[in-house]
Amino acid sequence: MPECWDGEHDIETPYGLLHVVIRGSPKGNRPAILTYHDVGLNHKLCFNTFFNSEDMQEITKHFVVCHVDAPGQQVGASQFPQGYQYPSMEQLAAMLPSVVQHFGFKYVIGIGVGAGAYVLAKFALIFPDLVEGLVLMNIDPNSKGWIDWAATKLSGLTSTLPDTVLSHLFSQEELMNNSELVQSYRQQIGNVVNQANLQLFWNMYNSRRDLDINRPGTVPNARTLRCPVMLVVGDNAPAEDGVVECNSKLDPTTTTFLKMADSGGLPQVTQPGKLTEAFKYFLQGMGYSSVSLPVAYLKDRRLSGGAVPSASMTRLARSRTASLTSASSAEGGRPQACTHSESSDGLGQVNHTMEVSC
């Protein structure tokens, strides 16, 4: 792989072109951070605030970042021709190995929001060897029931597409308050994203199937995410119930559930600093840190030096280290994540819900 791919790229995949933006250059054998945005947005609208925050610079200087725009959702995208069949959620996930292979990434740490979180979860289920960890914000692992489907259809008849999408992105409290943030996103969704292309993506997301995952040990041959996962949701966010259910279906020994107070439907926009802190802990739990690493982690050749320096830990990070990060030894060459559960009875384990409110 060349030293630097910094910039925009159109990658050929089995299901069409995919617009990708690379920031930085590869750092040795460390994975790339790969992002996937929510429906109604693109990588700029979804992640610019988060990745441009000062604290995040402490992380991104140690990892190459790969932003993926869903087909036709990038700024300036041409409208798809009449009759174009938008890729299914499974096909969107199946497009990502082409990105990984094109840039020569060995594996990635995914950060996805809403529809993007669903796509990355699918990607990790189908191609587990390519995913080292996942941060899934506002994920809904379920298909739409008939009542929800009918409500979506009715909403589409009585509301504009941007307003329909806003009810997916923001909490009712945020919408009712008619905040400056909601108004800004209403305008950007309507003006920046091609509306015909957005409608196709929106329709496909609402036609998604269940992720069909189960906590290991609850059913024979349970299908689950094998990598470390951090689930994130804002308090009173539209996706709160879905994230809670997803948490109940994942392995409690490799899953963190983070509920962020005062963050609404877009925690990466409203609380970028707090989310960055949580992401630091997540990386530390995977071994990318020079702070209190167990011997098992130090044996992994990729961890020498650590990706996140201890100096970057703030007072908040230090005060919450005990409750947010504890590591378990790796079963193979790649580090495993920490556990944040409060029970030790296997089937009865329930994850600790961490509400960040400071």
Image (cartoon, rainbow, N blue to C red):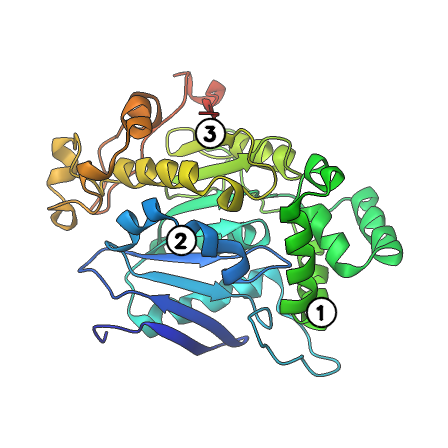
Give the foreground label among 2 and 1.
Answer: 2
Which percent across, then down, holds residue 157? 88, 57
Q: Is residue 108 above or below residue 235?
A: below
Look at label 1 and name its amino acid: Gln
Q: CA distance from mark 3 to mark 2?
A: 37 Å
Give the foreground label among 3 and 2.
Answer: 2
**Quadrant where the image shows the C terminus:** top left
Crowd class of label 2 (few under 14; some 14 to 19; many from 20; radius 10 Å)? some
Q: Residue at x 58, y 44 (%)?
A: 212
Q: Would you name the residue on which mark 3 appears?
A: 217
Sequence-earlier tag: 2 or 1: 2
Look at label 3 and name its amino acid: Gly
Q: Would you name the residue on which mark 1 appears?
A: 195
Q: Would you name the residue on which mark 2 appears?
A: 51
Q: Residue at x 23, y 38 (%)?
A: 330
Say which quarter of the image contains residue 89.
bottom right
Q: CA distance from mark 3 to mark 1?
A: 44 Å
CB-based contact (under 8 Å), mark 3 and mark 2: no
Say which quarter of the image contains residue 7.
bottom left
Sequence-earlier tag: 3 or 2: 2
Q: Residue at x 57, y 60 (%)?
A: 90
**Quadrant where the image shows the N terminus:** bottom left
